[in-house]
């Protein structure tokens, strides 16, 4: 027997992200084995347990975990996603599907009834397109994108459904594609999903080829210049922390996100407001007439969005996820007029994806949305009669797994 390994020390935010990205590598191995009906390597299970112990050893501040940012600053973070998903994966590998399902049933109210509702709507069906949002929909919500590594059970469930029931499975997110993006936090085997990011302005197809929505040269030059200015800004000592908290600094295709606050309010309110002001000045410097960029401030994130012109007129609008669906479908030769389609989401920004499918195939589009908001639920039911609402991503992915195995 090897000597008991000392617990790995995680003290800085960088140690933490490194550890989480190692769990992605371990999880990819587990998912590959399970999809191929092979046994999971003992070293993989040990790797998950070691990561779990390392997270548990981080120093605490009440319910939160304290990570060092630099020599003078620290940040207190909520790690319930990272820890909760590791626990589920360890249980899944140790006890199999029944052990995990029992755990999910204990965690969530009316779990079984909600799963049955989805299975009842979609039972026996094969889909031409499955278009789904990621965070909060098929993946439990995590406050930091960089550590929102997909869990192994989740990847197995969603991949099985997509491989056995869907011709064109598309994950469509507003996050970037890489560095850190959708590809980095996904652990599904290659060749199962089309990974569409930046609201569908860019995607990686089933054959690992990257595609992007055409942006004219003038707009491309402007966004590159703004990106360089903001990159320079967040490299300055006083501003660096904004790239390390919450959503951080994300360069998406046609959109840039910079966090000004996180859910734990790690930044002083005045400092957070000052950053917003500073970013507005940087934008005004490259786009003095305000024609090309629009700022969306969520209070936590500053989203700088490149506007697009609608075909046929001069009206400017933001690129939404419905535009993303139309772009991806056109680029891969997916005829949206031919259903059935399944569209899944969890916020109002996902409704344009459903609308795009309904416009093309009004009688053959199905929807499952994950929300506790009555107003959004009502809007989904109004938009798509063949829809159900559930409360948790775990309900949706478990239902998808049931729907895939029921054929075999
Ligand atoms: Mg979402």
Image (cartoon, helix red, strand yellow):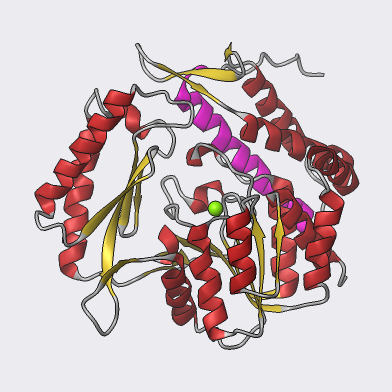
Task: Depth check: give the residue in front, 41 or 199.
Answer: 199
- Provide the major secondary structure of the magenta segment: helix
The quadrant where residue 267 appears: top left
Lateral position of residue 41 relative to residue 329, left or right: right
The quadrant where residue 194 appears: bottom right
Is residue 14 located in the magenta-colored stretch of the structure?
A: yes
Q: How many numbered marks appear? A: 0
The reply to whether residue 192 is visible in this rendering is: no
Above or below: residue 47 compared with residue 119:
above
Which image quadrant: the C terminus? Answer: bottom right
The image position of residue 249, as x and y in percent, is 34, 40
Which image quadrant: the N terminus? Answer: top right
Task: Depth check: give the residue in front, 371 or 240.
Answer: 371
Lateral position of residue 101 relative to residue 221, left or right: right
The quadrant where residue 43 appears: top right
Is residue 290 located in the magenta-colored stretch of the structure?
A: no
The residue stretch that appears in magenta: 11-37
Residue visible at 24% across and 23% down? Answer: 237
Lateral position of residue 402 relative to residue 238, left or right: right
The image position of residue 107, as x and y in percent, is 79, 38
Residue visible at 52% across and 74% down? Answer: 355
The image position of residue 39, as x and y in percent, is 83, 48
Above or below: residue 280 compared with residue 160:
above
Residue visible at 45% across and 77% down? Answer: 326
The reply to whether residue 155 is visible in this rendering is: yes
The image position of residue 126, as x and y in percent, is 74, 78
Task: Depth check: give the residue in front, 380 or 38.
Answer: 380
Above or below: residue 245 compared with residue 36:
above
């Amino acid at each position: 027997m090897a000597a008991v390994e000392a617990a790995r020390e995680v003290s800085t935010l960088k140690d933490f992200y490194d550890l989480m990205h190692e769990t992605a590598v371990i999880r990819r191995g587990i998912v590959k084995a399970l999809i191929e009906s092979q046994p999971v390597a003992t070293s993989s299970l040990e790797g998950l347990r070691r990561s779990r112990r390392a997270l548990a050893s981080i120093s605490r501040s009440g319910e939160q975990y304290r990570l060092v940012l630099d020599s003078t600053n620290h940040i207190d973070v909520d790690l319930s996603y990272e820890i909760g998903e590791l626990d589920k994966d360890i249980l899944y590998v140790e006890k199999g599907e029944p052990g995990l399902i029992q755990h999910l049933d204990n965690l969530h109210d009316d779990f079984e009834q909600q799963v049955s509702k989805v299975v009842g709507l979609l039972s026996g069906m094969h889909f031409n397109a499955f278009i789904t949002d990621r965070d909060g929909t098929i993946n439990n919500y995590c406050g930091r994108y960089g550590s929102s590594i997909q869990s192994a059970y989740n990847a197995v469930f969603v991949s099985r459904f997509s491989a056995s029931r869907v011709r064109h499975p598309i994950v469509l997110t507003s996050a970037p594609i890489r560095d850190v993006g959708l590809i980095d936090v996904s652990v599904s085997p290659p060749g199962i999903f089309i990974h569409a990011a930046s609201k569908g302005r860019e995607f990686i197809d089933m054959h690992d080829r990257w595609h992007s929505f055409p942006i004219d040269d003038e707009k491309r030059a402007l966004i590159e210049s703004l990106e360089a200015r903001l990159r320079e800004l967040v490299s300055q000592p006083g501003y660096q922390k904004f790239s390390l908290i919450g959503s951080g600094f994300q360069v998406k295709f046609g959109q840039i996100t910079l966090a000004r606050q996180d859910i734990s309010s790690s930044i002083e309110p005045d400092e957070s407001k000052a950053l917003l002001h500073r970013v507005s000045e940087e934008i005004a410097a490259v786009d003095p007439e305000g024609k090309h960029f629009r700022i969306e401030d969520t209070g936590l994130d500053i989203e700088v969005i490149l506007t697009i012109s609608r075909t046929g007129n001069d009206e400017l609008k933001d690129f939404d996820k419905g535009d993303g669906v139309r772009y991806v479908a056109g680029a891969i030769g997916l005829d949206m007029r031919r259903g059935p389609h399944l569209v899944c989401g969890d916020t109002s920004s996902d409704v344009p994806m459903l609308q795009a499918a309904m416009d093309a195939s009004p009688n053959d589009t199905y929807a499952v949305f994950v929300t506790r908001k009555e107003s959004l639920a009502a809007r989904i039911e109004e938009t798509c009669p063949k829809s159900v609402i559930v409360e948790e991503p775990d309900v949706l992915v478990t239902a998808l797994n049931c729907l895939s195995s029921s054929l075999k």
